[in-house]
Each structure stands twice: as structure tokens, then as C-alpha cells.
Image (spheres, rainbow, N blue to C red):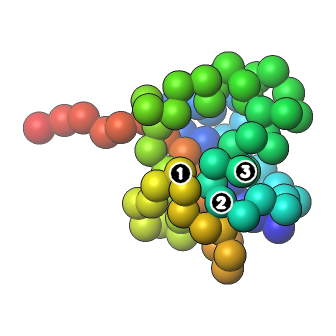
Amino acid sequence: MINVLYFAWLRERIGVASEQVETQAKTVADLVAELCARDERYAVAFEDLGALRVALDQDLAEFDAPLAGVREVAFFPPMTGG
């Protein structure tokens, strides 16, 4: 079981801030594919992975990163500021 967090417009499009997900995914990209297959809201939210960032257990990662041993996955848009 992995805790999945959604921030900013992802949370708005999917409709939840977080959820517990039972998954067989080996990588972040596999998890995204599983989520998109569940419901169209996920497919819309994840249609442009280039506009998203991901963190595994609060460390920035890539979408090809393995999920073995990961407890938390957070998806969010790139941060801007200055």
C-alpha cells in the first residue's frame, strides 16, 4: 500500500488530496498508468507528465524511478518563485 498525494491543480482535477493505493507498479510511470486506467479524472490530470514533478518519500525523483520500498508518492506541478 502506497500513500499518494496530489497538490495544486492535480488535487483539483482528481478531486482528492491523498489516497491509499494498492498497486503492483514497479515504477512511478507504472503507477501513473494504473491510476489513469482507473478513472478519466486521472487520465486528464496526468496527460502531460512534462508539466509534473514527483517525490518519493519526500525526495525528488523521475518517473522511471522504482517504487520498491516507497511509502509515499507525491505529484505536483513545478514550483516557481523568487
The tag earlier along the polypeptide, 3 or 1, is: 3
Q: Residues within 10 Å of mark 2 (few under 14, many from 20)?
A: some
- Residue that mark 2 sits on: 27
Horizontal side of residue 23 vs 57, given as left or right? right
Which part of the image, by quadrant, shows the C terminus? top left
User: Which numbered circle lies on residue 63?
Assistant: 1
Number of on-image labels: 3
Residue type at the position of mark 3: Leu
Q: Residues within 10 Å of mark 3 (few under 14, many from 20)?
A: many
Q: Are marks 1 and 2 in contact (CB under 8 Å)?
A: yes
Q: Residues within 10 Å of mark 1 (few under 14, many from 20)?
A: some
Horizontal side of residue 39 vs 68, given as left or right? right
- The percent coordinates of residue 66 (x first, y second) are 61, 67
User: Which numbered circle lies on residue 31?
Assistant: 3
Mark 1–mark 2 distance (CA, rounded to whole Å): 7 Å
Please tell me which residue is depicted at 71% across the width and 51% down the height of the picture: 30
The tag earlier along the polypeptide, 1 or 2, is: 2
Please tell me which residue is depicted at 74% across the width and 41% down the height of the picture: 33
Q: Is residue 5 at least partly visible in the picture? A: no
Q: Is residue 30 at least partly visible in the picture? A: yes
Q: Are marks 3 and 1 in contact (CB under 8 Å)?
A: no
Q: Are marks 3 and 2 in contact (CB under 8 Å)?
A: yes
User: Which numbered circle lies on residue 26?
Assistant: none
Mark 3–mark 1 distance (CA, rounded to whole Å): 9 Å
Residue type at the position of mark 1: Phe
- The percent coordinates of residue 51 (x first, y second) are 43, 30
Residue type at the position of mark 2: Thr
